[in-house]
Amino acid sequence: MSAIPQDGQINNWLKWSAAELSLTLEENTREAEWLLSSLLNCSKSELYFQENELSPTQCELLQDWIRRRINGEPAQYIAGWTEFYGHRFNLNSSVLTPRPETERLVDVAIHSLQEFDKPNVVDIGTGSGCIAISVAAEISSASVLGLDISGGALAIAEENAALNKITNVQFLQTDFLQFTPVEPVYDCLLMNPPYIPINEMDILMTEVRDYEPELALTDHKDGLTFYRHLSNMAKKWVHSGGWLIMEVGLGEHPQNVSACFDINQFTNKELIADFNGDDRILKVNVI
């Protein structure tokens, strides 16, 4: 354990934080910068030009944050926010931390929705609202509805819509597996569902398994429940010519999900790679 700084010099606390985190994290300096800049409400680059010192209260809080991070709690939960698609999103343990690969889903959605003048979009399992809000922010003519079974998640999503001043998005609490619309009014359905098979939960990283909401991680079965349900119910949600755009997992999961849509009510099925070259998005056209 490194010696705790005896003053409030920001550079000393940054070095101490990085040293403490190096015991458990490879990207220790980056994470130390993230946490300290979040504490001071400044950019990472501004850390190195700060003339002010940490107050005794801030020093104590930073020590607590570093301890929590060493124990495995995600930095985004500790700081209470993250950045996604150029927007700030507040977070707590009611929602998943948005992943970089999910930004690819937003990319594909924005491109696919160009063919509609005023697209009507639904986001299943909206969580923090990162997908719904990002799409709504990029396409001002769109009307976006985010659905989630969790009231706690929807409270965060509403907060994030207000934070980002996005008015063309709404949220509704409902169970996707039980709810069916009166008619298929949507041009596009977006979905990043719980897709981790229950038998893989034990091998997840500690910061995922022990801190992120299980409800948003696994369907407690084989990771395909939501996709199978959508393949059966798609025409009740999305009109003919509309799109289904879904995030999928790694390994054999993309092909297993794709097979769920090997029926004659779909066409133009495409698996799309993320920036690591892994197939992470499935795009399907409803006939």
Image (cartoon, grey):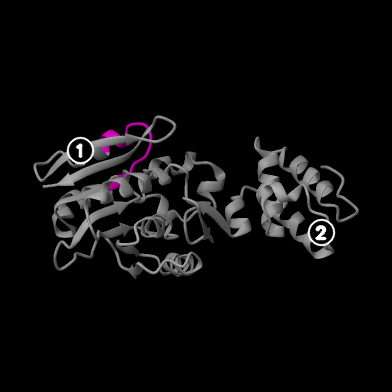
> How many numbered marks, from 0 up?
2
As rendered, which of 201 and 98 lies closer to the eye? 98
Q: Residue at x 68, y 56 (%)?
A: 42
Give the image quarter of residue 129: bottom left
Q: Residue at x 53, y 52 (%)?
A: 83
In the visual, does 132 lie left or right of 236? right
- For disc 1, the marked residue is 269
Query: Residue 33 versus residue 210: which sits nearer the camera?
Result: 33
Res 221 seen here: no
Task: Kindly identify the amino acid type of the residue bearing the numbered disc 1.
Answer: Lys
Q: Could you tell me the amino acid type at mark 2?
A: Leu
Residue at figure coordinates x 72%, y 38% from the top left: 23
Would you place residue 267 above or below residue 56 in this image?
Answer: above
**Depicted 252 relative to depicted 124: above or below:** above
From the top left corner, tell me how far across and down residue 97 is, in percent.
Answer: 50, 52
Queried whether the magenta region covers residue 252, the answer comes back as yes
Q: Which residues are magenta?
A: 245-256
> In the rendered image, which quarter contains the N terminus?
top right
Inspect this view and state whether residue 165 appears: yes
Residue 254's label in the rendered image is none
Query: Could you say which is closer to the camera, residue 96 or residue 276?
Result: 276
Q: Residue at x 81, y 59 (%)?
A: 54
Residue identifier under label 2: 54
Circle 2 sits in a helix, a strand or a loop, which is it? loop
